[in-house]
Amino acid sequence: MEQLLYIAGQFPTVIYSTLLGIVAIYWLVGMLGIIDLDLTPDADLDVDVEADLDTDLSAGFGGLAGLLLTFGLTSVPFTLVISIICLISWLISIYLQLYAFVLLDSAWLYYLLGSVSTVLIFFISLPITGFLIRPLKGMFVSIETISSHNLVGSDATIATGKVTETFGQAKVLNEGAEILLDVRCDPEHRLSMGDKVLLIEYSKGSHSYIVAPFPEELL
């Protein structure tokens, strides 16, 4: 364990160690309900990919949309894709540090190869991530399909510390399975974790539900 921590703190592995730490904090804070975890496929990114494809097919793809399409990183939440990329890059960097970089005696060569490897590791992690998330695509498409008009009128329980016009999540049971949905509410309502709410409308643009306090007469 001490050796692992030492290697994780050395250049160039420390770069991916830092990114992985940020990702871990993000998921931890999200599970505590402090921030809104985005677990729906990013429709805007999918649209951008399709637009790039239609606009200039012969010229190839560029930028983020091109990378997503080329390596099959669409139809899965972008936050999950980034998290897996960071984890894979960190693992590759750890093994390079452990079995290759330790053999380098020259300091300038060490930092030169370390800098180059940081970029190469990132691109190597892309096809690996695409392969790993392939089985997940159907699952998230199903969740996105469920997260539509099908659940309007259902009751749910707030899972985050608060719900606002731009933030919030709630748990709802669908055919025996608990689903975490993005929810929003009007400023007049004060909702907090554990409150029971009613899903009254689905916003396709934000992929979220508009909720209101569950009617007291129905409790």
Image (cartoon, rainbow, N blue to C red):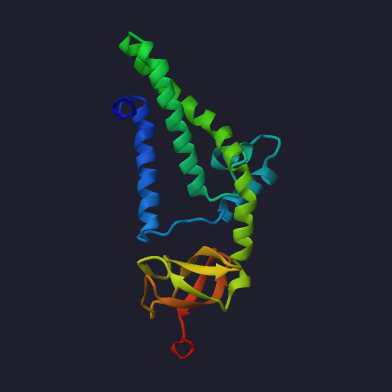
Left or right side of 184 for 48: right
Q: Is residue 129 above or below residue 32?
A: above
Q: Residue furthest bottom?
A: 217
Question: In x, y percent, where is residue 141?
Answer: 63, 55
- Which residue corresponds to the image point at 38% horizontal and 38% vertical from the top-left? 19
Q: Is residue 21 above or below residue 213?
A: above
Above or below, comparing residue 30 to residue 199 in the picture: above
Please identify the quadrant where the N terminus is shown: top left
**Residue 202's spot in the image, x, y percent?**
57, 71
Q: At which x and y percent is residue 81?
A: 52, 44
Residue 68 can be seen in this image: yes
Q: Is residue 33 left or right of residue 207?
A: left
Give percent across and percent down for residue 179: 53, 63
Q: Is residue 206 in view?
A: no
Residue in the picture at 37% in, 27% down: 13
Number of marks present in the image shown: 0
Q: Residue at x 43, y 21 (%)?
A: 96
Q: Quadrant of residue 61?
A: top right
Q: Quadrant of residue 104?
A: top left
Q: Is residue 176 above or below residue 188?
A: above
